[in-house]
């Protein structure tokens, strides 16, 4: 996002949808469920970061790790002590 003249924090005002589009454009390609399942079958680790409501609605993914979203970075960092946030 470019800075807008007069904005006190130097950021451009935008909608949540615009922020999501921009953020998602910088992420690597998201694989399909079928490709994720095939990768998991050959040893890939699947980490499910969906919220509880989505898991209840769309069902659990067998074999996936389910870390709390607010602890994900600490649990995935091999250097973190105890794997939980401070």
Image (spheres, grey):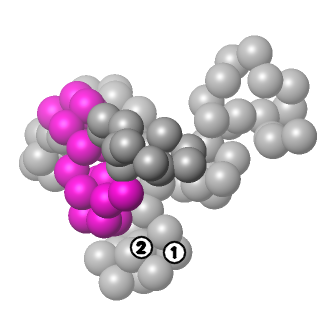
Give the residue displayed 41% in from the left and 73% down from the top.
55
- The C terminus sits in image quarter: top right
- The N terminus sits in image quarter: top left
Q: Secondary structure at mark 2?
A: helix
Query: Disc 1 to disc 2, how far (Cα)?
Result: 5 Å
Q: Which mark is residue 55?
A: 2
Q: Residues within 10 Å of mark 1 (few under 14, many from 20)?
A: few
Q: Secondary structure at mark 1?
A: helix
Give the residue displayed 81% in from the left and 41% down from the top.
85
Q: Position of residue 79 (x, y in %)?
A: 75, 15
Give the residue at the far top of this rendering. Answer: 79
Q: Position of residue 66 (x, y in %)?
A: 54, 54
The image shows a total of numbered marks equal to 2
Near-viewer residue (60 or 28): 28
Asked if 59 appears above or below 76 in the picture, the reply is below
Give the residue displayed 34% in from the left and 64% down from the top.
16
Residue 70 visible in the snapshot: yes
Residue that numbered label 1 is attached to? 52
Occupied quadrant, residue 44: top left
Q: Which mark is residue 22?
A: none
Give the residue displayed 25% in from the left and 31% down from the top.
26
Near-viewer residue (6 or 11): 6
In this picture, residue 35 sits left or right of residue 74? left
Q: Which residues are magenta?
A: 13-29
In this picture, residue 74 sits left or right of residue 26? right
Q: Residues within 10 Å of mark 2 (few under 14, many from 20)?
A: some
Decide: marks 1, 2 in contact (CB < 8 A)? yes
Q: Position of residue 82 (x, y in %)?
A: 86, 32
């Amino acid at each position: 996002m470019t800075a807008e003249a007069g904005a006190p924090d130097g950021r451009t005002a935008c909608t949540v949808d615009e922020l999501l589009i921009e953020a998602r454009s910088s992420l690597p390609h998201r694989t399909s469920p079928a490709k994720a399942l095939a990768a998991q079958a050959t040893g890939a680790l699947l980490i499910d970061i969906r919220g509880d409501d989505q898991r209840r609605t769309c069902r659990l993914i067998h074999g996936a790790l389910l870390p709390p979203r607010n602890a994900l970075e600490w649990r995935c960092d091999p250097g973190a002590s105890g794997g939980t946030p401070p």
